[in-house]
Amino acid sequence: MGAAKGGFTVNPDGSINAASVEDALNLSEAILARQQPGQARGKRIVRERTTPVNRESSAQKFIQTLEQYSGKEIGSEQLAKIVGVDSAAAVGPKIRHLRAAFEKEDLSLADYLESSKEGRAPTVWKVK
């Protein structure tokens, strides 16, 4: 389907063919003029926060929780309870999340927790 003479044509797939660049610009201008404020693509509405946010990061919470285990070795089952996951199998993904949270704060999870595994034995976690 071609564009109508001196205008535009809307194709069945929703695409639009304009007869000229000028017609395309006029159509674009008309569409943008009808949009609600903040509706245009790429525009972000920035609102000021009315109340301050005092959230502890995952890293800070984890450090505080680990303090009571300082210097001890714990198993994955116990670590699962500490980090709030259902099983020892879910500890790995949670540790990856925590490692990323630590890195965002320029900290290293290895400074607080270290894993060791020998052969087929369960992983043992050393809390520093």
Image: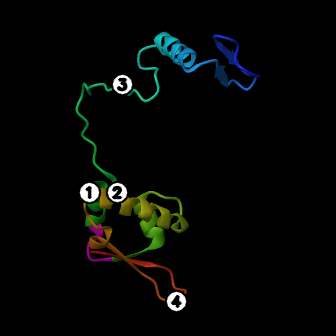
For residue 101, the mark is: 2
Q: Are marks 3 and 4 in contact (CB under 8 Å)?
A: no
User: Residue 42 location, x and y as percent?
Assistant: 43, 30
Disc 4 marks which residue? Answer: 119
Relative image position of residue 38 (x, y in whole percent): 41, 20
In the image, 81 versus 117, the foreground residue is: 117
Element under disc 3: loop
Secondary-structure class at tag 4: loop
User: Could you give the CA–CA distance between mark 1 and mark 4, rounded to whole angstroms?
Assistant: 33 Å
Badge 1 vs badge 2, beta-carbon distance below 8 Å: yes
The quarter of the image holding the C terminus is bottom left
Residue matched to label 3: 45
Q: Residues within 10 Å of mark 2 (few under 14, many from 20)?
A: some
- Count of marks placed on residues: 4
Give the extent of the magenta segment.
68-72
Q: Which numbered disc covers residue 105?
A: 1
Check if residue 70 falls in the magenta segment.
yes
Give the alpha-carbon distance from disc 4 to disc 2, as whole Å: 29 Å
Q: Are marks 3 and 1 in contact (CB under 8 Å)?
A: no
Q: Nearer the viewer, residue 19 or 63?
A: 19
**Pointer 4: residues within 10 angstroms few (<14), some, or many (20+)?**
few
Q: Quadrant of residue 52?
A: top left
Q: Is residue 67 left or right of residue 4?
A: left
